Amino acid sequence: MSAMPSLDEERLKALAAAFSGLLLRPGDVGYDEARRVHNGLIDKRPALIARCLGTSDIIGAVGFARENGLEVSVRGGGHNVGGRAVTNGGVMIDLALMKGVHVDPAARTVRAQGGVTWGEFNRDTAVHGLATTGGVISTTGIAGLTLGGGLGWLMGSHGLVVDNLVSVELVTAAGEVLNAGAGQHPDLFWALRGGGGNFGVAASFEYTLHPLREVYGGLVAYPFSAAKEALRFYGKFTASVPDELSVFAGLVHAPDGSGVPLVAFIICHAGAPKRAEADLRPLLGFGSPILTQVGPIPYPAMNMMLDAAYPKGALNYWKASFLRALDGAAIDTMVDRFAACPSPMSGIVLEHFHGAVTRVGVSETAVPYRDTGFNLVLTSVWTDPATTNANITWTRATYDALAPHFAAKRYVNYLGDDEGGDAVHAAYGPNYARLAQVKRKYDPGNLFRLNQNIAPAVA
């Protein structure tokens, strides 16, 4: 590891004098805890962690980093598998203490600060019987998920998170505070809806909410011997599901730690219970499941259903891409490769895109992946560092084996830290050039580059 850069002590004193949060350096109490993110594989050491309490703290931290020529990373919920929330030797702008959530039940909107997780968000909106699309794991931060597009259980009914975004309070590289929305800085607002952390630090987000208290959700699992048949059924069943019904499929291991492989359907129906029962009848009547746990549950509980499978501190290495089609050859490869999976915590997940998410134009937001179909995610998770090489090797080999079945589209939030510019171009497709122009306008020096980076357009 390279030597930690020295900080300008006079400038640091000036920052501290006006800073309401915490400034942590190596050796300080709380430094090691603050630098850790959800993925235990990430072990980076910032020269300074600026634990912000508000927008003015963000402005100060951005200015300090810019004036000292230091790399900037931004942490919201700290869930990104690639670990780009932490810098080695730079300034980590940490929003994890910024937890404000303010619901306007009459307007059906909410403004939430950049350190809020989806579990915290859902808890406050549920008080009013309201919700919006927000991920599939409740410990995920709202900031990173939103800025990358934001898939979730409700995307069939309400689209991606960015399709429900009203405005963003953003601190730019120059230290300006902009409230970007449809009527203010519309070019920036367009880019923030999927363009990642390329344009500044998002202090808070405003979203549209929808009436929702309960969903009809749960899990149906089958023995691994039924995996190919089950996935073929899944492809046919999801071809005609209504907007209200989201079904993801997974090759997973039994949650009891036995390592027994299974094939499972994860179900969320956001419509009326009787409608849900009718829509799910073919699925619930399929095959001979070894576990069926499906029924009415609060939406926040649905959003927490998979949390235990992704514990904080576990080691993670993920790869993902959209499939051209869920055909027999792709299914055979998935099942054959999963049989050699080295960790009982890992899975191969299929996320179904349909409904409202597919009725938004490719260029309406920065997110271009608007086709009906499936995103395939290799979620490799393990706890023993001695098996790291085996798990990473399996993930890469499985991804390569499945590559002939991939479309030329990627979801930016799943891109790993070891993937370069080609992957970023694939994630933005026809929108990349426009994003580069917006980047040039708001961050011409590429201060915010520790992300899935979009280089500023050349003049």
Image (cartoon, rainbow, N blue to C red):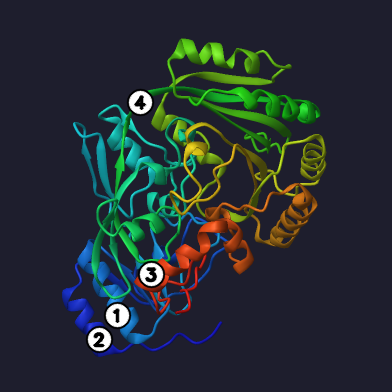
Say which residue appears at 34% left-offset and 56% top-offset.
189
Query: In screen coordinates, is 9 left or right of 288?
Result: left
The spot of residue 151 in percent (x, y) is 49, 42
Q: CA distance from mark 2 to mark 1?
A: 7 Å
CB atoms of marks 2 and 1 within 8 Å: yes
Disc 1 marks which residue?
64
Q: CA distance from mark 4 to mark 3?
A: 40 Å
Q: Nearer the viewer, mark 1 or mark 4?
A: 4
Q: Which tag, 1 or 3, sits closer to the chain's start?
A: 3
Callout 2, which amino acid? Arg
- The answer to whether residue 418 is visible is no
Query: In screen coordinates, is 438 left or right of 82?
Result: left
Q: Residues within 10 Å of mark 3 (few under 14, many from 20)?
A: some
Disc 4 marks which residue?
212
**In which quadrant is the N terminus drawn?**
bottom right
21 shown above or below 241: below
Callout 1, which amino acid? Phe
Disc 2 marks which residue?
11
